[in-house]
Amino acid sequence: MNPFIQLGIRHDIVNAISELGFENPTPIQEQSIPVLLTGSNDFVGLAQTGTGKTAAFGLPLLELLDFEEKHPQALILCPTRELCLQITSDIKKYAKNMPNVHVVAVYGGASISDQLREIRRGVQIVVATPGRMLDIINRKAIDFTQVGFVVLDEADEMLNMGFQEDIDSILSTTPEDKKTWLFSATMPSEVRRIAKKYMTDPYELTMGTKNTGNENIEHEYYIIRARDKYAAFKRIVDFNPEIFGIVFCRTKIETQDIAEALIKDGYNADSLHGDLSQQQRDKVMKRYRERSLQLLIATDVAARGIDVNDVTHVINYSLPDEIENYTHRSGRTARAGKTGISISIINGKELGKIRQIEKTLGKRFVKAEIPTGFDVVEKQLFALVHKVHNVEVNEQQIEQYIPRIMDEFNGMTKEDIIKRFASLEFNRFLDYYKNAPDLNAPVDESRRSDSTGERFARTGMKSEFTRLFINLGSVDGFSRGDLLGYICNTSKISGRTVGKIDVKGVYSFFEVPNDEVEKVQSGFKGADFQGREVRIEISGEGTSESRGGSSSSNYRRPEGGGGERREGGFRREGGNREGGARERTGTAGSAGANTGFRDFSGKRREDRGERRRRF
């Protein structure tokens, strides 16, 4: 018998969740469902993300509501559109064997008219983000006077995002006698106040110690020099061949630029941040959920509420400003009882912050060493061997090719064939990591200020790049990564040679080496996109050199014209925050490849009386 039956969940719901793989309830589900099924208590549940909170409140709601009625009976508020869509999808799956269940997702960034249409058709459960929900209430397009249950999911995140006033306004439209269920990963004083304000003698359930992290997560940190940050990050990724991770950054700019550099370096990566349209966000998340992306580079705001199965690693490229955000970040892995690793890449000055997080979570972090080049090569080699050993052979399809394959290998011994297969991957990493330096910061250096290491301005270097115009942009569905791929595929040039990409609405700019301009223009002759002619022109602003002289370029190729591969790095100054007013400098470089390094700066400069960006 499925244990959910014993909790009081009826058979048609249990059958649906059994098909989803729900075999045993998680601790939060086992403790909360019997309480919530009574429908007589306000409730406060404190549990980490990834512990099954959606089912903990979703299953009781399906038991308690009257689905013969078509008016709103339950309102679920959550902080982000991703979480809103996730909760809506989950509840629909739980209810797939039940008739007349109508759930609507209400969130910003999508058509409000479509959402209003769904509400008018009749709905029992509304899942919403506070901003869009308040908009619909102000239009007098929904009636919450018969709502019996309000769920505040990820309450701490909603308050961190500044939704206190919106929540107050929304709850003022609901009945006094409703039951309020609050779920939160942490219990700061703001959450405690909201519980006191809207609840009467709530039943409180705490899974584990308050404000602690998931016990299934291992926490590691690496101390590096600031100038080696990106190189160290890539080496950590390479040392984990099966990584499926989320990488957290502080700013939109850092997020976008790291993703672009990873794409140029051959990684399956993309960015998620607040400047993306809903369509772009959905596209990125679809690719990530389907695992066609290996690394998702995200800001805290953009990643809130992301619920993706089997995330192996969370990497803190930059530590969060708030310690609570670390809990939410690390909670993206080790979900539903699985294990995961949270990695922080820091300089010596940030060691104190690690100690603060340790104290808050009640967990000791492990100081790890950046692997050597040899370690990475060895790890990649045996990952390939493991993959070959476990690959599923389609006997029927491959049979017709076996004679030709055997002819190719004629005269080779078994050992020769194995060596050649292993060398396919081995040689690439061996070449890349040949003479790779030690990236671990010595103790004495890790204690020094890294301001000098982070300042990485290059001056006096002549630009070798031309800025080109293309009549495609974000309205055509292009992100920077998409446009990079399109340019490379059409003009047959390497992504490593492409410099800065600036995607606008209906057009974009990108930079290529001067000696590649003719090849790009030739490659795009006669090209069309969805029936429209694609135009490539040299930008009216001219080359990078004409936009500020030789010192304007932050892009450098290795001496000798290329052949040598080396690890490079991101440099950042100024600590830009999302929405900040500082301008960025630096050209997209490909760390570790022939394009050299990438440079960021928060500084502005004056040139002929104007403020300009340096490229």
Image: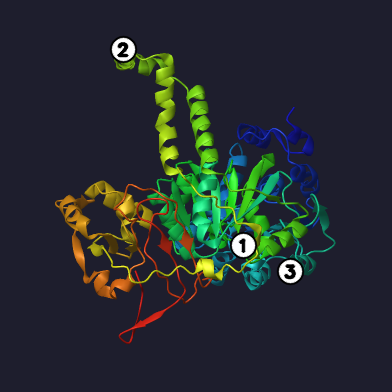
For residue 351, above or below residue 292 = below
Judge by depth and name the residue closer to the eye, 436 or 219: 436
Q: Residues within 10 Å of mark 1 (few under 14, many from 20)?
A: some
Q: What element carries label 3?
A: helix
Labels 3, 1: front one: 1
Give the residue displayed 36% in from the left and 64% down from the top.
587
| Residue occupied by mark 3 | 190
Q: Position of residue 400 (x, y in %)?
A: 32, 14
Give the number of callouts. Answer: 3
Q: Where is residue 103 in the image (x, y as percent from the top left)?
A: 57, 50
| Residue occupied by mark 1 | 445
Distance from the alpha carbon under mark 3 to that under mark 1: 40 Å
Question: Is residue 73 among what the camera can see?
Answer: no
Distance from the alpha carbon under mark 2 to that under mark 1: 60 Å
Q: Earlier in the sequence, mark 3 or mark 1?
A: 3
Q: Earlier in the sequence, mark 2 or mark 1?
A: 2
Identity, as a three-letter code, of the amino acid under mark 1: Glu
Q: Classify the position of the N terminus by image quarter.
A: top right
Labels 2, 1: front one: 1
For residue 29, above or below residue 407 = below
Q: Which of marks 2 and 3 is nearer the N terminus?
A: 3
| Residue occupied by mark 2 | 403
Do the residues under discs 3 and 1 have CB atoms within 8 angstroms? Answer: no
Give the residue displayed 58% in from the left and 48% down from the top.
370
- In which quadrant of the rendered view does residue 612 lie? bottom left
Horizontally, is 600 left or right of 515 in the view? Answer: right
Give the residue displayed 26% in from the left and 63% down from the top.
464
Identity, as a three-letter code, of the amino acid under mark 2: Pro
Identity, as a three-letter code, of the amino acid under mark 3: Glu
Give the residue displayed 43% in from the left and 23% down from the top.
419
